[in-house]
Image: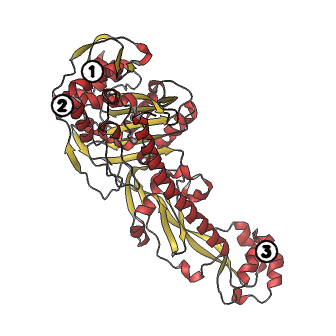
């Protein structure tokens, strides 16, 4: 097996091992919770806990919408110390409440107890049964439960709560619920930067993409480039935290920050930014493309084996020319190229204030045995591993004029500039190159707005056989208005079964998202429409 794939294999194996351990612990905790509840080991007094703080999303007006809150539900319990006629209860209660006779018999054994839980979140019919029959020692009360009113919305970010033997009150087991458990337990509330309406639209768009193209999953990230504020963070498959026990553990993963992938040609603008900023070339620099180049015994070809002849760096982006990216990287130099990737934040975590973020990886380029072909393929996004949030944040550098921001999801966090990566002039030059690509393709173009973006259609590494499989991942990253970007949107789908190119799958979805956000924020146009030109 080749060194590159060994490195990536170890990276993925380590990542899944770490996450697998965490998810296994969740599974054990979950089973303990159900066992404890089934045996009703809590006394009634334990219900008098502090009310857990809420988790809020926001909207464009600055309003707050609760994503996680507390809700009182009816419960039914028995007080064994009050029961004189056990046989009478055993004859009628199990059928009336839909519980097992063994469960009731076990509850009644503890004669000193005044509280043994029989039914959580009791139905109207169960409540009527108790009320109408006036059962000895059987009572109705209310209990506080964690509720997620929008169900699946941002579930992988919010997480969920459960119970452990160590605490009688709900404990955060995953996501923001876990990250801020102490604060929430004390009654403090967390306000997220997530816009409820944009998040809902992103999840709707993503679900439609997955269904239409037969993908197994995907992610959408929406970031405000000037600040690093994350406006939407959607991933599929997801889960309903109200009933998290019904879902496979893999659905708890947040792929936008916890899984890496090779992004493909969407990395070409990053390569161009490095070359232009370093003075290695300009957007007008040209070279003669022969359609392929062989390095270390491996031949790199353009998509569909196209030969372009003499083309400029702008045309390399317009046509997504692989050999053009290789030419660009060679002009930059290997060490300088890797240095710029690191400046853009690749090879480290973004530092986002969300739980369990993993790092992107440049290990394939930093090993002593790295070959020329490794740097060449990295120029167009192969052999490097990134998370969707990492990639969106790197494009925010281009969108905001050259600054690497620290992304954040907690409204209490403040915008933080990590470093300057490229000059404002370079950022403008690369933006124009990306605009030109959008105009030429036409699919992402929006009337009255300048749009900049780039596609990526990447094959997925085959860690068993080496090389790459026939399965792909499609990505598009873009921003608008290009003159003064309000948002960066990344859309990615995994293993689509229909549609060979990202331009036919995720690009129309980007246009949908972009139009929605532009309208939602009432963003002024930055170009004349075709009708206005007339």
Q: Is residue 262 visible?
A: no
- Rate crowding at label 3 as few (under 14), some (14 to 19) or many (20 or more) other CA atoms within 10 Å: some
Check whether the beta carbons of the residues at disc 3 and disc 2 lie within 8 A of each other.
no
The residue positioned 30% from the left and 25% from the top of the image is: 435
Dot 1: few (<14), some (14–19), or many (≥20) neighbours within 10 Å? some
Instruction: Kindly indicate the quadrant of the structure image that contains residue 289.
Output: top left
Q: Position of residue 19 (x, y in %)?
A: 47, 53
Q: Earlier in the sequence, mark 3 or mark 2?
A: 3
Residue 274 visible? The answer is yes
Q: Is residue 36 left or right of residue 236?
A: right
262 over 411 or under it: above or below: above
Q: Nearer the viewer, mark 1 or mark 2?
A: 1
The residue beneath circle 3 is 101
In-front residue for pair 347/9: 9
Q: CA distance from mark 1 to mark 2?
A: 16 Å
Q: Earlier in the sequence, mark 1 or mark 2?
A: 2
The percent position of residue 191, horizontal first and vertical second, equals: 38, 59
Q: Is residue 145 above or below residue 390?
A: below
Which image quadrant is residue 260 in?
Answer: top left
Question: Which element carries disc 2, helix, strand or loop?
Answer: helix
Q: Which residue is tagged 1?
A: 327
Q: What residue is rendered at 54% in x and 69% in y?
A: 163
- Asked if marks 1 and 2 touch (Cβ < 8 Å), the reply is no
Compared across the picture, whether 324 is left or right of 129 comes to: left
The residue that mark 2 highlights is 277
Q: Earlier in the sequence, mark 3 or mark 1?
A: 3
Q: Assign the C terminus to one quadrant of the image.
A: top left
Quick one: 109 or 95, which is closer to the camera? 109
Sort mark 2 into few (<14), some (14-19) or many (20+) by Cα contacts within 10 Å: many
Q: Is residue 255 left or right of residue 333?
A: right
Q: CA distance from mark 3 to mark 1?
A: 76 Å
In percent of width and height, residue 440 lies at 35, 18
């Amino acid at each position: 097996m080749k060194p590159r794939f060994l490195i990536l294999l170890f990276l993925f194996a380590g990542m899944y091992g770490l996450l697998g351990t965490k998810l296994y612990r969740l599974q054990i905790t979950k089973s303990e919770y159900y066992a404890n509840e089934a045996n009703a080991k809590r006394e009634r007094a334990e219900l008098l806990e502090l009310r857990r703080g809420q988790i809020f999303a926001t909207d464009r007006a600055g309003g707050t919408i609760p994503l996680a809150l507390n809700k009182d539900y009816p419960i039914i319990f028995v007080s064994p110390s009050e029961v004189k006629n056990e046989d009478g209860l055993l004859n009628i209660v199990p059928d009336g409440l839909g519980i097992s006779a063994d469960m009731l018999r076990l509850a009644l054994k503890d004669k000193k107890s005044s509280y043994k839980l029989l039914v959580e979140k009791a139905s109207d019919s169960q409540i009527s049964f108790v009320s109408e029959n006036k059962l000895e020692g059987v009572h109705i009360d209310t209990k506080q439960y964690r509720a997620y009113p929008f169900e699946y919305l941002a579930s992988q970010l919010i997480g969920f709560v459960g119970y452990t033997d160590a605490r009688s009150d709900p404990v955060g087991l995953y996501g923001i619920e876990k990250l801020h458990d102490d604060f929430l337990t004390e009654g403090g509330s967390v306000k997220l930067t997530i816009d409820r309406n944009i998040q809902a639209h992103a999840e709707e768009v993503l679900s439609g993409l997955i269904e239409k193209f037969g993908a197994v999953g995907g992610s959408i990230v929406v970031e405000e480039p000037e600040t690093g504020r994350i406006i939407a963070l959607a991933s599929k498959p997801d889960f309903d935290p109200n009933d998290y026990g019904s879902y496979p553990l893999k659905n708890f993963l947040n792929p936008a920050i916890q899984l890496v992938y090779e992004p493909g040609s969407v990395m070409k603008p990053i390569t161009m930014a490095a070359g232009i900023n370093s003075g290695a070339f300009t957007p007008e620099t040209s070279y003669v493309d022969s359609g392929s180049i062989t390095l270390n015994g491996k031949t790199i070809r353009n998509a569909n084996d196209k030969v372009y002849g003499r083309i400029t760096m702008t045309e390399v982006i317009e046509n997504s020319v692989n050999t053009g990216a290789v030419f660009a990287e060679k002009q930059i130099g290997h060490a300088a190229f890797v240095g710029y990737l690191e400046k853009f934040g690749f090879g480290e975590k973004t530092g986002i204030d969300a739980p369990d973020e993993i790092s992107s990886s440049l290990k394939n380029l930093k090993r002593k045995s790295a070959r020329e072909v490794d740097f060449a393929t990295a120029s167009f996004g192969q052999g490097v591993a990134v998370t969707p949030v990492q990639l969106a944040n790197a494009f925010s550098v281009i969108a905001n004029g050259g600054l690497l921001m620290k992304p954040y999801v907690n409204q209490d966090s403040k915008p933080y500039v990590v470093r300057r990566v490229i000059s404002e002039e370079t950022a403008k030059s690369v933006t124009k190159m990306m605009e030109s690509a959008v105009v030429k393709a036409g699919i992402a173009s929006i009337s009255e707005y300048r749009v900049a973006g780039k596609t990526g259609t990447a094959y997925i590494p085959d860690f068993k056989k080496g090389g790459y499989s026939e399965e792909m991942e499609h990505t598009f990253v873009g921003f608008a208005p290009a003159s003064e970007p309000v948002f960066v949107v990344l859309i990615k789908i995994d293993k689509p079964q229909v549609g060979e190119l990202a331009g036919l799958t995720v690009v129309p979805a980007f246009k949908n998202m972009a139009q929605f956000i532009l309208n939602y924020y009432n963003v002024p146009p930055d170009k004349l429409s075709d009708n206005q030109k007339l």
